[in-house]
């Protein structure tokens, strides 16, 4: 499906002390580069924010700069020509191309005749319509009841004023349950969808197709007419976090409807703009909605990369990850880098591995090496070499 991507990367990052948040690095790449990589299949990728050395990206700025997410979206939307637009924050370290594909699939396979509730895919994805009710069953999916809606913006720039971090909020009971065992499997190409019939904008077909060709029609109170092909596709899809809260800077929207809504919208809140256009609320594994609003968020993202790398390296080397005391090794390398020299840290870890592999390392080898590093400054060349 043809789509463009708009990435908002020009906020003030107040909770990061005004730092260049999209430029902060996780796993060797800036946050905004992570997001750009996730939309590599976009026809055009538009970043609203300061220009950066990222190839094949159109950079624009809202007027005036840092005037909020709605003006930033308007500036990016001016460059969009595709029928669908993926809207993302510029600080999502965990989002991948598979997550974007799941959003697009949800947008283009919304089944007609369903109302609100929770439809949990047997592959671990969850589609939530935008308002209350019970969904019709979809082949291959398990239907569960929903307790209703909860809302939160993706980041501090998504609504005015900013909201607390997602970690501080209690989870509704219907989303706090553990996900099925198969939630960690790769993203499916087919996700359950349902549509809202409660106070939604006029119905639109998808990509010029009417309901007879499989297009989902979004009815409204007092207006259940068949939409004309010129009106564009039906409603958008927004991700929800583990607490069921909408993440307004992680979704996909029909371009024509979004333009019309934006032209008539006087407010500053993305929720106020996008809420009436939302047809599906989609829960995906892997926390693709996780954003880096604080230094703690950034540290969590970086530690997640370390965990992934450790698991991958252990698999490659045939090592049981359970036998790796990561924190102990990190303490060792930190003390060696601080007390001796930075290049000595990886070298020491390698020497420790050689000794353990040869069976010559004592049980307290790490403790001895840490003590040696701490005493390095007091040691003399003679005491270290004349043995």
Image: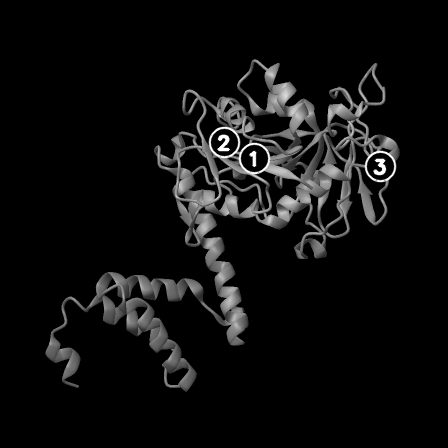
Q: Residue at x 65, y 28 (%)?
A: 255
Q: Position of residue 289 (x, y in %)?
A: 57, 41
Kind of element beneath mark 3: loop
Q: Are marks 1 and 2 in contact (CB under 8 Å)?
A: yes
Q: How many other residues sit within 10 Å of disc 1, few (<14), some (14-19) or many (≥20)?
A: few
Q: How far apart in space, not on screen, are marks 3 and 2 (Cα)?
A: 41 Å
Q: Position of residue 217 (x, y in %)?
A: 81, 28
Q: How many other residues sit within 10 Å of disc 3, few (<14), some (14-19) or many (≥20)?
A: some
Residue that numbered label 2 is attached to: 164
- Left or right of 282? Residue 45 is left
Q: How many other residues sit within 10 Å of disc 2, few (<14), some (14-19) or many (≥20)?
A: few
Q: Position of residue 282 (x, y in %)?
A: 68, 39
- Left or right of 40? Residue 182 is right
Numbered circle sitting on residue 169: 1
Mark 3 and mark 1 lie on one chain; the one further toward the N terminus is 1
Q: Is residue 310 above or below residue 294?
A: below
Q: Are marks 3 and 2 in contact (CB under 8 Å)?
A: no
């Amino acid at each position: 499906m043809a789509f463009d991507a708009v990435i908002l990367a020009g906020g003030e990052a107040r909770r990061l002390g005004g730092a260049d948040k999209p430029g902060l690095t996780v796993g060797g790449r800036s946050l905004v580069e992570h997001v750009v990589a996730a939309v590599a299949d976009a026809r055009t990728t538009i970043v609203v924010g300061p220009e950066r050395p990222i190839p094949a990206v159109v950079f624009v700025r809202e007027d005036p700069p840092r005037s909020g997410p709605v003006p930033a979206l308007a500036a990016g939307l001016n460059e969009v020509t595709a029928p669908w637009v993926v809207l993302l924050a510029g600080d999502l370290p965990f989002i991948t191309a598979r997550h974007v594909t799941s959003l697009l699939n949800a947008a283009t396979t919304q089944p007609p005749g369903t109302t609100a509730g929770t439809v949990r895919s047997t592959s671990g994805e969850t589609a939530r319509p935008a308002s209350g009710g019970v969904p019709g069953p979809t082949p291959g999916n398990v239907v569960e009841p929903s307790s209703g809606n909860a809302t939160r913006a993706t980041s501090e720039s998504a609504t005015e004023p900013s909201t607390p971090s997602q970690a501080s909020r209690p989870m509704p009971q219907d989303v706090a349950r553990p996900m099925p065992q198969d939630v960690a499997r790769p993203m499916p190409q087919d996700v359950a969808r349902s549509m809202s019939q409660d106070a939604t904008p006029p119905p639109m077909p998808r990509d010029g197709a009417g309901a007879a060709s499989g297009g989902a029609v979004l009815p409204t109170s007092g207006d259940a007419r068949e939409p004309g092909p010129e009106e564009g596709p039906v409603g958008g899809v927004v991700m929800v976090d583990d607490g069921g809260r909408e993440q307004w800077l992680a979704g996909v929207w029909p371009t024509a409807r979004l333009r019309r809504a934006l032209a008539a919208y006087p407010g500053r809140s993305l929720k106020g703009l996008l809420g009436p256009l939302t047809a599906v609320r989609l829960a995906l594994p892997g926390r693709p909605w996780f954003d880096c609003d604080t230094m703690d968020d950034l540290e969590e993202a970086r530690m997640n990369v370390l965990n992934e790398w450790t698991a991958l390296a252990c698999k490659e080397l045939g090592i049981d990850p359970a036998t790796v005391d990561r924190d102990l090794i990190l303490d060792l390398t930190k003390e060696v880098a601080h007390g001796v020299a930075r290049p000595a840290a990886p070298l020491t870890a390698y020497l420790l591995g050689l000794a353990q592999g040869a069976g010559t390392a004592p049980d307290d080898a790490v403790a001895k090496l840490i003590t040696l590093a701490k005493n390095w400054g007091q040691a003399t060349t003679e005491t270290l070499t004349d043995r």
